[in-house]
Amino acid sequence: MEEDKTYEEKIVWLLAGVMLLSAVMLGGCGGKKVTAESIVQEVNANMEKAKSFSGDMNMDMTMGFSDGTEEQEMALNMEGTLEATIDPAVTHMNMTIDMDLLGMSVDSDIYTQVDGDTTTTYTGVAGMWTKTEQPTPDTEGVEELYAVVSDGKDMTLAENTEKVGDKEAYVLTSVITGEELQGMMEAMGDMTQGMGVDMSSMDANVTMKVYKDSMMPATISIDMNSGEGIEVEGIVMKLSMLITVNYNEFNTIESITIPEEALAAEALDTSGLIDETAEVQK
């Protein structure tokens, strides 16, 4: 059971990585007229002033395995709500994970708190809480990723705006290469070690919609696909993943309180599991 919860937490950190990538996409250089660069520059400036945000997210992931004679496929869906404060850096997610291959659905209550060099994750399932501690991502690695993405890929601004709810929104698109995706995972360090997903052969189509009136993000979606697949020792794995984050409100959350029963949970030692997973992948 501990192993399942640890993997679940790694999926959460994968989503956290996507949110990091979406934040990276809010960088760029501006211009005098309305361009993709000027929009992301203004959104970036507005997001830096934000004290909190809330929204919802959804991830659909499909993994297929084939040895040339037999094929097997598994699908995983993860959806729920999220809220976060910037200072202190606390995130709360209510998530439901559905795994069709196992025929099971898991409801999770997840809190993360960044305290200097340590990031703590509290996961509640069926009233039982676990706690894990991981090193906070290396700032230098994240800065290098920021430079790669913001300088290496131009975003394209659609000619027409679209409706998001009852508001007009700019639509911007871009493509992130597999090397940049893998760099994102590596920049997160130990948090994603053992995930077993090599993103270097994947591309990601990114769509970002920005509220025209407030110049704040409305929704960000990332569609990743491994194409022909990744071959490891005669087994071909194909991976597709669509992640969507919707931002609903900004600056409405004063604070997020982690439940006492979560704070009192005994910390799990995941170092052994990470080492074993890394050894299997060699």
Image: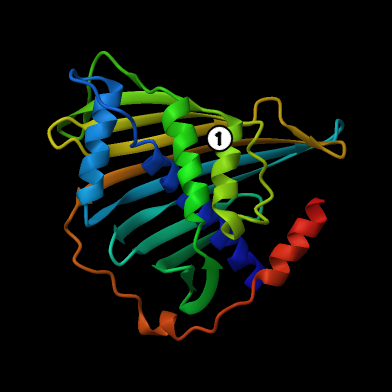
- The answer to whether residue 93 is left or right of residue 119 is left
Viewer-closest of 91 and 21: 21
**Residue 267 falls in image quadrant:** bottom right
Viewer-closest of 235 and 212: 212
* Three-letter amino acid code of the residue under disc 1: Glu
- The answer to whether residue 225 is left or right of residue 81 is right
Q: Position of residue 173 (x, y in %)?
A: 38, 24
Q: Is residue 141 above or below residue 151?
A: below
Name the residue tied to disc 1.
180
Residue 68 visible to the viewer: yes
Mark 1 closeness class: few <14, some 14–19, many ≥20 residues within 10 Å:
many
Q: Residue at x 46, y 78 (%)?
A: 127
Query: In the rendered view, how is the structure colored?
Result: rainbow
**Residue 38 falls in image quadrant:** top left
Q: Position of residue 251 (x, y in %)?
A: 17, 55
Viewer-closest of 124 and 70: 124
- The answer to whether residue 17 is left or right of residue 202 is left
Q: Is residue 138 above or below residue 199?
A: below
Residue lying farthest to the front in this orientation: 140
Q: Residue at x 50, y 42 (%)?
A: 144
Viewer-closest of 12 and 278: 278
Residue 1 visible to the viewer: no
Q: Residue at x 60, y 66 (%)?
A: 6
Residue lying farthest to the left in this orientation: 213
Q: Residue at x 46, y 65 (%)?
A: 108
Q: Position of residue 205 (x, y in %)?
A: 48, 27
Q: Is residue 89 above or below residue 122?
A: above
- Report helix, strand or loop for mark 1: helix
Q: Position of residue 118 (x, y in %)?
A: 48, 70
Residue lying farthest to the top in this orientation: 159
